[in-house]
């Protein structure tokens, strides 16, 4: 999540206790709790190495077997410049910056902001984020780069910023903003050592905040999607557009997953909040206008029913076929795209839950076992989820030619779970189904607002509140070790976690132990013998090198200090790549680091990355001033690494292809950076 769109409001008003009381009892049993309050619990945890698995009778998360790999670069210094930094022996190239034409229907990008909405519809969007590389015919030098476009900067997008006339936005500006959102599918090719966009390729396609998409799963079968537009179309299972696409994922059958994160801010409801539905309050629909005032465009300027008025979900005097009260119900999902089939609609897979999805990753595949997907709700005191397919994995489906039908097979039916982290490094996956038990012993399906699976999905975090999930410190990207199946998640930060005897839900707990957690941390877990069980432990704590030992728990130094871990991905060799956003670090811009979990060796078994082995975490990339480093993808041979630089202040240099050129830009542009080893070879080793 970009800090530019982050909503600091805490929407979780449940009384869920993130096991503070249980933790205190456990620490007392061990005889280590000497003082009352969260500080004592925190100090005791620190003395134990802050592991979730430190009981004599519990097993640690399974350590990965040795991969025989090692990082083949020296950690680079932090930097604060209008350029990117990479290790010696590597080059960094700018690729497909915002506004790059995908076909002849788009004019060349103009650095005065004068491109039209039609230009933007046919060019790469703004604010690059999550992405994935899909090879063409198995090639390592040609493929489709799918990338998200999270939000916009109106001052950069338009010549003179956003304008209004008597509080009304002009239709042309708003269409341009809508078209700058969403996803780009970009055909790219490596020629003569340089990657470039294949203009006018049949594969190039834009999905925007106005593109019609299908919905499947529980919500699609309900009447909770009916609007004036769907009634006119005669198909209620339609949604227009995808908004605030942050992290991403992909599937074993070759499709792209884009994740709708801070979508609630694109919708507003203006009547008395007492009339609102529970999920509108819980998920954070705006009561003070939409983020970019798209709803203010005069209806007379609309090209189709509700083109702009749909962003106001206030009910009218009629029924749902006369307004857009249900419009927001079509948003907040994992969206599946087949990049190889530009004629196919994108599909929103509602069974995977509706919340502020950061990303989506699938678990290690086992023939005859379900396919599992993980996703975090990126907001303070929110939850971690997994979806377990009803269908069992058939390896032949990895080569399916009807990829979206395969997606329907594994993603339309299954069980959605939410995580509860307990002491002693154990945890429970709590089902979010109509027959699930709440924390006070009721049946979820007997509670108003949760009587059907569609209602549970529409208010996924509300259901998670009721069953007793653990509020976390902003769960963002998940990543699955391809060798072991261990799952990692970044908990980016939470400056509102503090000792407060009147509100246990904000207290430090076993999984989120630091007060005022401005640096964030990473945890990992292994699944148990049943779908309801897992074992977890701490992997890594962010910190400045100068912080004291109760904060710098992993013993980081100047070569690898970081804060606010965000993007997270394994490559197929087992290298884990960690990206930061707004890293609370005065010594360097946002960055990307690498580590190989299977190669960690330490005398301290209580914390995976600690003072004994922290030197195995190395800084590989530093971005330009004011940017976020996000999104990561690899070619099949691991010789090209792609990442995105979002919202830089003065980069890249106009017309430059060298990402390390720090000479400045006339109009800064989010861009993809391609990193390759000089002379060829696998990146990172």
Image: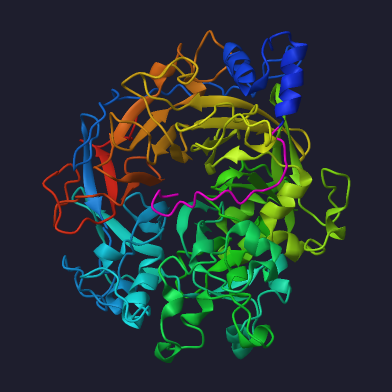
Name the side, left or right, on which 268 lies relative to 219. Answer: left
Query: Residue 639 location in percent, x, y?
Result: 32, 40
**Quarter residue 683 falls in:** top left
**Visual colour scheme:** rainbow
**Quarter residue 180 falls in:** bottom left
Q: Is residue 43 magenta?
A: no
Which residue is located at x 75 percent, y 14 percent?
A: 28
**Quarter residue 199 falls in:** bottom left
Residue 215 in view (yes/no): yes
State which region is magenta: 1-18
> Observer-nearest residue: 141 or 410?
410
Specify the quadrant that holds the C terminus.
top left
Query: Residue 95 location in percent, x, y?
Result: 25, 54
Which residue is located at x 31 percent, y 22 percent?
A: 559
Which residue is located at x 55 percent, y 53 percent?
A: 357
Name the side, left or right, on which 203 lies relative to 29. Answer: left
> Observer-nearest residue: 587 or 55?
587
Determine the main secondary structure of the stretch shown in magenta: loop
Residue 242 in view (yes/no): no
Above or below residue 209? Residue 67 is above
Point out the residue furthest to the left here.
Answer: 663
> Observer-nearest residue: 162 or 631?
162
Above or below residue 146? Residue 316 is below
Above or below residue 11? Residue 569 is above
Name the side, left or right, on which 255 lies relative to 443. Answer: left
């Amino acid at each position: 999540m970009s800090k530019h769109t982050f909503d600091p409001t805490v929407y979780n008003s449940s009384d869920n206790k993130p096991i503070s009381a249980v933790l205190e009892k456990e620490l007392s049993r061990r005889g280590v709790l000497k003082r009352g309050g969260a500080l004592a619990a925190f100090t005791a945890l620190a003395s134990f190495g802050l592991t979730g698995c430190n009981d004599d009778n519990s097993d640690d998360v399974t350590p990965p077997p040795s991969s025989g790999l090692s990082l083949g670069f020296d950690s680079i210094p932090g930097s604060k410049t209008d350029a990117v930094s990479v290790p010696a022996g590597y080059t960094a190239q700018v690729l497909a910056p915002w506004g790059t034409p995908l076909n002849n229907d788009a004019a060349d990008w103009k650095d005065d902001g004068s491109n039209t909405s039609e230009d933007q519809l046919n060019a790469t969007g703004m604010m690059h984020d999550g992405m994935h590389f899909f090879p063409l015919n198995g090639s390592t030098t040609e493929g489709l780069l799918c990338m998200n476009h999270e939000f916009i900067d109106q001052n950069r997008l338009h010549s003179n910023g956003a304008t209004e006339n008597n509080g009304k936005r002009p239709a042309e500006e708003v269409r341009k903003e809508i078209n700058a959102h969403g996803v780009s599918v970009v055909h790219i090719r490596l020629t003569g050592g340089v990657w470039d966009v294949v203009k006018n390729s049949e594969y190039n396609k834009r999905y925007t905040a106005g593109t019609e998409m299908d919905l499947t799963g529980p919500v699609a079968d309900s009447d909770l999607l009916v609007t004036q537009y769907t009634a006119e179309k005669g198909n209620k299972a339609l949604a227009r557009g995808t908004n605030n696409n942050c992290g991403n994922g992909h599937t074993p059958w070759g499709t792209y997953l884009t994740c709708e994160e801070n979508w609630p801010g694109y919708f507003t409801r203006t009547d008395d909040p007492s009339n609102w539905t529970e999920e509108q309050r819980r998920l954070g629909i705006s009561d003070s206008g939409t983020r970019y005032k798209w709803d203010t465009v005069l209806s007379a300027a609309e090209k189709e029913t509700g083109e702009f008025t749909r962003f106001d979900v206030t009910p009218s005097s009629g029924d749902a076929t006369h307004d857009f009260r249900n419009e927001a119900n079509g948003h907040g999902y994992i969206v599946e795209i087949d990049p190889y089939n530009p004629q196919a609609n994108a599909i929103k897979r509602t069974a995977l839950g509706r919340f502020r999805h950061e990303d989506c990753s699938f678990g290690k595949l086992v023939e005859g076992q379900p396919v599992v997907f993980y996703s975090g709700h990126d907001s303070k005191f929110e939850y971690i989820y997994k979806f377990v397919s009803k269908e069992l994995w058939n390896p032949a489906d990895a080569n399916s030619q009807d990829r979206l039908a395969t997606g329907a097979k594994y993603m339309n039916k299954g069980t959605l779970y939410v995580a509860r982290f307990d002491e002693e490094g154990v945890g429970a996956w709590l089902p979010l189904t109509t027959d699930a038990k709440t924390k006070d012993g009721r049946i979820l399906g007997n509670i108003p607002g949760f009587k059907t699976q569609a209602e549970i999905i529409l208010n996924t975090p509300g259901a998670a509140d009721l069953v007793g999930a653990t509020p976390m410190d902003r769960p963002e990207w998940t990543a699955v070790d391809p060798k072991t199946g261990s799952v990692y998640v970044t908990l980016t930060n939470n400056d509102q976690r503090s000792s407060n005897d009147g509100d246990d839900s904000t207290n430090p707990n076993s999984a989120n132990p630091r007060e005022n957690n401005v640096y964030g941390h990473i945890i990992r877990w292994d699944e148990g013998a049943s779908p309801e069980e897992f074992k977890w432990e701490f992997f890594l704590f962010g910190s400045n090198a100068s912080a004291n030992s109760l904060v710098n728990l992993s013993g980081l130094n100047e070569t690898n200090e970081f804060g606010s871990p965000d993007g997270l991905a394994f490559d197929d060799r087992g290298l884990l790549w960690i990206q930061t956003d707004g890293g609370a670090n005065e010594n360097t811009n946002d960055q990307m680091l690498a580590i190989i979990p299977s190669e960690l060796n330490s005398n301290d078994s209580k914390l995976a990355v600690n003072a004994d082995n922290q030197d195995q975490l190395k800084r590989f990339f530093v971005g330009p001033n004011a940017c976020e480093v996000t999104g990561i993808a690899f070619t099949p041979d691991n010789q090209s690494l792609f990442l995105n630089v979002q919202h830089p202040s003065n980069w890249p240099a106009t017309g430059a292809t060298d990402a390390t050129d720090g000479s400045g830009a006339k109009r800064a542009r989010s861009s993809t950076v391609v990193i390759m080893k000089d002379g060829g070879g696998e990146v990172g080793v």
